[in-house]
Amino acid sequence: MLPGLFWLLFFAGDEGSALKMELILFLFLSLVPVYSRGQGVYAPAQAQIIHAGQACVVKEDNISERVYTIREGDTLVLQCLVTGHPRPQVRWTKTAGSASDKFQETSVLNETLRIEKIQRLQGGRYYCKAENGVGVPAIKSIRVDVQYLDEPVLTIHQTISDVRGSFYQEKTVFLRCTVNSNPPARFIWKRGAETLSHSQDNGVDIYEPLYTQGETKVLKLKNLRPQDYASYTCQVSVRNVCSIPDKSITFQLTNTTAPPALKLSVNETLVVNPGDNITMQCSLTGGDPLPEVVWSHSPGPMPPNSLVQGGNLTLWRIRVEDSGYYNCTAINNVGNPAKKMVNLLVRLPPTISVPKGQSTITVREGSRAELQCEVRGKPKPPIIWSRVDKETPMPSGTMTMETYDGKLRLESVSREMSGTYKCQTARYNGFNIRPREALVQLNVQFPPVVEPAFQDMRQGMGRSVTLRCTMLKGSPMKVATSVWRFNGTLLAQPLAEQQDYSELKVDSVSRETSGSYECSISNDVGVSTCLFQVSAKAYSPEFYYDTPNPTLSQKQSKNYSYVLQWTQKEPDAVDPILKYRLEVRQLAQRNTIQTFIPVKKMEKGLLLEHILPNLKVPQSYEVRLTPITSFGAGDMAARIIRYMEPINYPNPTDNTCRFEDEKICGFVQDKMDNFDWTRQNALTQNPKRTVNTGPPTDISGTPEGYYMFIEASRPRVTGDKARLISPLYNITAKYYCVSFYYHMYGKHIGSLNLLVRVRNKRAIDTQVWSLSGNRGNMWQQAHVPINPPGPFQIIFEGVRGTSYEGDIAIDDVTLKKGDCPRKPIGPNKAVALPGSSAPAVHSPCVCGPLTFFLYVLLR
């Protein structure tokens, strides 16, 4: 077989002799090992690349690999000849990817690689890999170099600069010639038939610019001369490699050469209705040579219903998909291309809808919620969100919120945000239609809110009591689970559960069933708890504070007595009260004296009395009073009894407080106000105090006399309050008159208020007099009638005005029994206090001094 093959190749002819000799040698070397070892012997793969295409030249490179040069557009044929046993498989690959789409990652046997009309990007190193599993694969490669020369592109740029002021201008012209080629091209510049060079003409400069794409040569005509207006040719050459001929481009430079200029007949943004016909005219306003005008569309190609005639673009029966940007470009290779763009918007009536499954949004309180409406239309309208079922603002604080993507994002939602939200399109794009609307329901789930949080349940011995824990609020509004515990121990669950509450019945109240009951209610979101305290013990007594104290003072024995008065809270809630346990302890000692006070009859509101004799002057005592029933001891009430001598004023002949003593007649500063009243006189006041406000001296006019005042300077701010509270006065008359002097001078004066605090079961403050604004640089007197129904205190409240010139002062405060003087003296008013039967308004009065002893009852 082998000799016959040799002769066949030898007598095939002279054409391709070198290729034949390569093939003969390759076959001989490949087949010898197989014959020498006999039939069926395994042999590793061998490979060799040969070419059979339209090569320009094949040469060896510096790494003993062949370089195959071919002209762009010719046919590339490479063959990979392989030997070996078993027959090797062949795969062609390329350095930067597969050789072609046809052979991409494909294994073929003894295959020829053929590429018709090869392109420049298909140049590179090609690999033939032969593999049969015996030994290592055989890999051969060949480098393919694709030669090409494009048409050159010539662009012209002009610059004009002033020289020596404004006497004349210099015009410089740049002719930029650019070409893509392989191998690199040679440039030749000609003016007419004359070849240009640096040494030939001082007005000519030829250079390669930096940072250009492709190969570029620039011909610079400096300070344009009359002879420079001529025909210029840029000729490029690759020196006839692969028989590629030279190429050239010519430009006629004249004194009218100018870049293109355009104008449009329509606005840059054009809004039209579907079905309209429109024409957009793009007119040339300059350019020599005559520019070429081209229309283009983005995104995508020009629509099929378009017609371009010169610079005019007509669109017939416009559709929504015809929207986009239409670009008009004028090019004459002089300067930069002129461009105009029209943004064509085709109106589309808006529609709005809620995505499937998004009409109801359920989230937990504190989390994030997103409400969405899908809107369509051109231009796409913004979405306006508002609440439907509540007259409350949106989370932003406004009644509406505008979004452009149709999504309303709510951060950290609260239960108050639950409800129906409306999304609607804004009027926006010229369609005379009503806004489109859609609704989205937001459900904010939150743990239950239960009632009662705590309840004290009292009942007689042996009687039943029903405990109910009710869900007032919650989402979902349904009891999922309820758990009852007694003193921390789990109880059996009630059989019947209601929708919004859970009940537990205690059949018989006793000492064993008394204690703490806890109900934990869940609605699958969270848990809330009701707490019940169940017992048969009596409620605490309630001390009555309208008792003169002391009732009797024996100076010789230093003893005093006290009448203890009280009522019983809810006596009918439990079994009848049999007696009271009374415990009295002197505060300075630990020993307690215990006695029992029997009770024959007890009714709600019945005032009980007990005299505490032999109390030591001036000691204070703690008194504890505990009701006793058949259940045992009830709730205890305690109070402190203090003995105080009548308050001595600086002048013992009357009861006027002039604030001359540091104890300020028992007045105290309110700890709950913003700042305090200040005691001062003309000698102690700040020498740098604010002028044009505040009194120079007290009412007496002497520098030693003291008064109380509020300082309005920093850090005080508008509305700050200072409150001065009197001692507690026991009521010994029906009417009283509060008289005092006030000084309100300054352009920023705020208000001076007089309040009465009644001490009964709880403290109640009532404003009985008020005055505001500048009253001049003088002391003035006010008389305010009051009729307190029980022990009381008076409160002077100073309110800071708008700035620092707002000092207010008081002096000579008098409290007298009886009515005020009948003569009207200004804006003084009296307001009836709670529980009083006195008329709402009394005429101001002036009363004479009346000695009046004050006793303080402090809890």
Image (cartoon, helix red, strand yellow):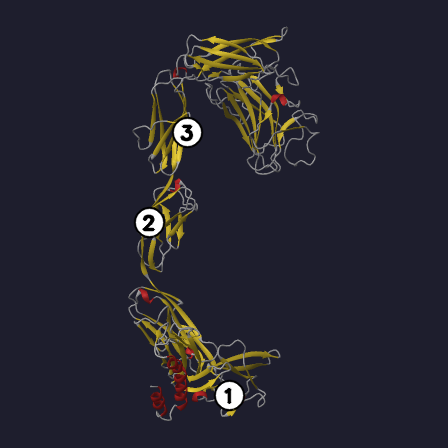
Near mark 2 (Cα within 10 A), the count class, few <14, some 14-19 or many ≥20, is some
Q: Is residue 492 above or below residue 574?
A: below
Residue where numbered disc 2 is placed: 358
Q: CA distance from mark 2 to mark 3?
A: 37 Å
- Residue type at numbered disc 3: Ala
Residue topped by disc 3? 453
Q: Secondary structure at mark 1?
A: strand
Position of residue 129 relative to residue 573, above or below, is below
Query: Which residue is the site of mark 1?
Result: 188
Tell me if I can see residue 218 in this picture: yes
582 left or right of 12? right
Horizontal side of residue 679 vs 315, given as left or right: right
Classify mark 3: helix, strand or loop.
Answer: loop
N-term-proximal mark, 1 vs 3: 1
Rendering quarter of residue 69: bottom left
Tag 2 secondary structure:
loop
The percent coordinates of residue 224 (x first, y second) are 55, 85
Where residue 495 appears, x then y in whole percent? Answer: 30, 28
Q: Compared to 682, does 197 lie above or below?
A: below
Measured Cα–Cα span from mark 2 to mark 1 = 72 Å
Could you say where residue 849 lies in the image, as x and y percent from the top left? Answer: 60, 16
Which amino acid, mark 1? Answer: Ile
The number of discs equals 3
